[in-house]
Amino acid sequence: MKEMQTKISTVKMERGVKGFTQWEQALRDASWYVEHCFGRSASGLANRGLYSWCSQDPANNRYRSRRVEVSPEEASFRVKRAARLFGADLVGICKLNRSWLYSKIYDWEKDEHLDVDTLISEDYQYAVALAVEMDYEALRTAHSIAGAATGLGYSRMAFVSSMVAEFIRCLGYKAIPLGNDVALSIPIAVDAGLGELGRNGLLITPEYGPRVRLCKVLTDLPFEPDEPIDFGVQAFCEVCRKCADKCPSNAISKGARSEWVDKLSSGRGVLKWPIDPIKCYKFWCANGLDCAVCVSVCPFNKPNTAIHKAARWLVKHAPSLDRVMIWLDNALGYGKQLDAEIFWKKVRARF
Ligand code: SF4
Ligand code: SF4
């Protein structure tokens, strides 16, 4: 599938198709550089490069037999502060619900499936959920430069989560940095109070809507956990179907939430709008690039300005106005896709 995607995008580049020129594809491929060379979590690989489960810096061996004594409350504050310093835009903490662990991960070197329940011992009682913001303007070119915002998000995930894990190891505790691998990032982020699950199957955060990438660190350092939040997303999604209407592959449900979903790629037993990731991925391959329409059109995807904070306040406190808010969102032209050339012009205007 991936080869087909590359082939199609190369043909589009050779033909000079708008949004697929060498400029856009170079920007996109460069943004993935750190993830591709030092991460590989997007490919499902675990325990390597920046995502190594043990420290790769021999200088930090001196911390091995030194464990700081700290209260759970202070540990939460200090680790969150460190995560912000390392580049996380949002950080929350929860007790690790082991239902969110995958059953198996694939070890490419040994060519075998490994049992996650055995690999992640019961010592790992906590998860630090981390989110990095993606570029608002880039996301508006949903089939083109948006891929650069995604790639940069993955590269930053590897960068941030590895340093948070190393910080905790230097305190004398165990820590495993994870991208997409080993455990589901969205329910962990929901448990840690970063946001709510939307109709588009993504985490919707108060600050950036679905315009974030997620990673996490599992650890045995005892924390004071955060609580899940409710700022009106699920009620809003009941009346808004913008992501489902605009999805080019019909992968997002326009119907009601269900616990009974296709179990090939979605976990059963959680009330949510079913997503069809296979339809989505097939579209990416046929298009030659990934897609972020369901991120860019979402009314929660806005710059975190005073006016949008006021709109979010209304969504939380006056759900009876949700239909008016959706009408306004459409009437004001939010969610319209930008041409790649407009992205370059907007960038130029800033420099
Ligand atoms: S990424 Fe694109 S194709 Fe996939 S679900 Fe979102 S809108 Fe649909
Ligand atoms: S576009 Fe509308 S329905 Fe879809 S996730 Fe965003 S708010 Fe929910």
Image (cartoon, helix red, strand yellow):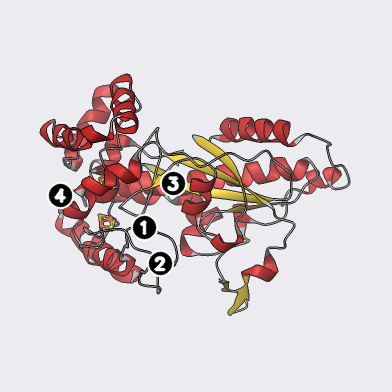
Q: Decide: marks 1, 2 in contact (CB < 8 A)?
A: yes
Find residue 140 and report its horizontal and vertical position in percent: 24, 41
Of callouts 1 and 2, the N-terminal one: 2
Crowdedness near tag 3: few (<14), some (14–19) or many (≥20) residues, C-alpha within 10 Å: many
Q: Quadrant of the C terminus?
A: top left
- Please state which of residues 134 and 226 is positioned toward the viewer in this rendering: 226
Of callouts 1 and 4, the N-terminal one: 4
Q: Which mark is residue 219?
A: none
Q: Is residue 31 left or right of residue 326?
A: right
Crowdedness near tag 4: few (<14), some (14–19) or many (≥20) residues, C-alpha within 10 Å: few
Q: Is residue 19 left or right of residue 46?
A: left
Q: Name the secondary structure under disc 3.
A: strand
Q: Decide: marks 2, 4 in contact (CB < 8 A)?
A: no
Q: What's the distance in space between the residues labelled 3 and 4, CA to CA?
A: 26 Å
Say which residue label 1 marks. Answer: 272
Q: Which mark is residue 266?
A: 2
Residue at the (72%, 61%) spot, across then down: 122
Of callouts 3 and 4, the N-terminal one: 4
Q: What's the distance in space between the residues labelled 1 and 4, CA to CA?
A: 36 Å
Say which residue label 3 marks. Answer: 213
Outermost residue, front side: 320
Q: What's the distance in space between the residues labelled 2 and 3, CA to CA?
A: 19 Å
